[in-house]
Every structure is written in structure tokens, then in C-alpha cells.
Amino acid sequence: MKLTHLYSAGLLILGSYLAQAQDHRFAVDNPKNPEVTEYWDPEVRVITPGAIPSDAIILFDGKNLDNWESAKDGSPAKWKVADGKMTVVGKTGNISTKQKFTNYQLHIEWQSPIEPDTRKSQGKGNSGVFMQGMYEVQVLNSYNNRTYRNGQAGSIYKQSAPMVNATSKMGEWNTYDIIYTAPKFTVNGGIDTPAYVTVIHNGVVVQNHTKIQGTTEYIGQPLNPVHGPGPISLQDHGNEVSFRNIWIREL
Ligand code: MG
């Protein structure tokens, strides 16, 4: 037998011995067994990532408002759809998704209209994205347009200013990626756990797990009505703000 063969055989025997020792050392009930803390089931659900993840629900693909309705009375949404985007038609009111949601990851793109400098502050490119129809992440043309800090683009309206102003130039598109956790209520109508929201504006974190204090009122303090799942709503503030590429993943 060649020396190399002897050497190989030796390695095999040693390997088998070590494997047995390993088995012994890592018995199932041995707390030092690394497998004690390894969980295999149920297997993590596989999705296909990409610009739109495979498990996303498409809320607007640029073609029609079939997934939307008037927030006020549930009649067909009356905003304009053209060129792959939907645009606010003033005085037709807010629109809401027909479907209701609780916890989710939402992607939405918005564009401020080209408006004259005579339009200022809250009057310039104002719209909004409402979590569960009642908590507004502000949409505003905040490019070279000062307003109160807790009312500019990326704010939780009148509650929490964005950490930075990442707004695109007027006429260019913005993205919001929003991670939302719905509030939970006690049986007595109190808050068990508040709502939280993370907002990424044009790839920049502007709200980091921000606590939502309640409804985002124009006048007065936030309210905390007990509620269940709610729609995504978009605001008609009279400015011709456009939206496109809206999708959501329930969490
Ligand atoms: Mg607004």
C-alpha cells in the first residue's frame, strides 16, 4: 500500500472518530449543541424581489382607478388618469383604496405640479398619504418652499417634522416607502400600543419608527378613536399633485 493510501485511510478513521465524538458531545438535549437554537420550520416564505416585490398588491399601475373610490361616500374616484399617473382634480375630494389594511409596507411616488412662486407654504403642491384613512404623511412641494417644520413633506402632519428635507425639485418625482404599524386598543377604548411609522423619502430615512400621537388634525390636538383596518387615502388639497406606481405589502 502506498504511503498516500495509508495516510488517506488514517484520515478516514480519524474523521469517523471525530464525527462520533461530535455526535456524543452535541446530544439533542445538550445545551451546548448549536442546533438547539436553530429553527428550520416553518420555512421562510420565498418571494421574488425587484422593483415591485412578487407579493405586493398593486394599488395603482398607471391605467385606472379601479382599486380606488371617493373617501367621502364610496362613489367612483374622480381623479384624472393619464400618462401613467393619477392627478388630483380639485374639489372632487380625497380618494381611498377599496381594500383596507392594518400593518404594511407601502410604496408610492408623487410629483408636485409646476406652480408659480405666488403659491407658498401649505398652498404649494399640497396633498397627503393617509395611513388607515386618518394619519397623514404630508405631501408638499417643500423644495425651496418654507412652511412650519411639522407640516412639510415627509412630516407626520402637525406632529413630527422629517429629519431632513429630501424633496425633489418641482415637477420631478418623489418616492415614499412607508412602513406602518397600526395602533392597538384596549377593550375600554384606550391605547394599548400606539401606531408607528417609518418613512423613507427618495431613499432617505425621514421618520424612524415615529410614534403617531393620533389623528393628524389641522386644528387642535390629535384624537384617538378606536378603529380597525383602514384604507390608504390620498388628499385633494386643491393642488394638482400626481401619483404613480403605488403598491403595498401586508406585514
Ligand atoms: Mg396635506
Image: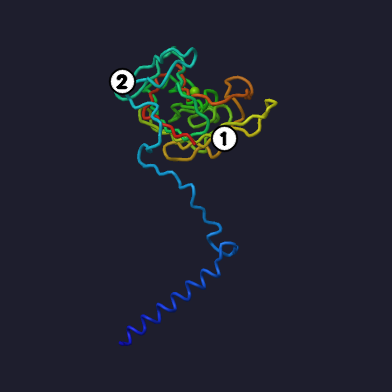
Image quadrant occupied by the N terminus: bottom left
Mark drawn on residue 44: none
Count of marks placed on residues: 2
Between 229 and 112, the one nearer to me in the picture: 229
Between 2 and 45, the one nearer to me in the picture: 2
Secondary structure beneath label 2: strand
The residue shown at (55%, 33%) is 161
User: What residue is pinned by disc 1?
Assistant: 196
Query: Which amino acid type is marked by label 1?
Result: Tyr
Look at the picture and state if 214 lies above or below 25: above
User: What residue is pinned by disc 2?
Assistant: 82
Residue 223 shown left or right of residue 231 in the figure: right
Query: Which amino acid type is marked by label 2?
Result: Ala
The residue shown at (44%, 20%) is 119
Please rate how many residues cluster around mark 1, counting C-alpha atoms within 10 Å: few if below 14, some from 14 to 19, many from 20. Answer: some
Look at the picture and state if 31 lies above or below 214: below
Secondary structure beneath label 1: strand
Whether tag 2 and tag 1 are in contact, CB under 8 A, the answer is no
Look at the picture and state if 223 lies above or below 52: above
Task: Kindly report the distance in space between the C-alpha atoms of the residues bearing marks 2 and 1.
Answer: 34 Å
Q: Position of residue 16 (x, y in %)?
A: 44, 74
Q: Position of residue 205 (x, y in %)?
A: 48, 40
Image quadrant assignment for residue 11: bottom left
Q: Position of residue 170 (x, y in %)?
A: 38, 28
Image quadrant assignment for residue 5: bottom left
Among the two numbered marks 2 and 1 on one chain, the one whose residue lies closer to the N terminus: 2
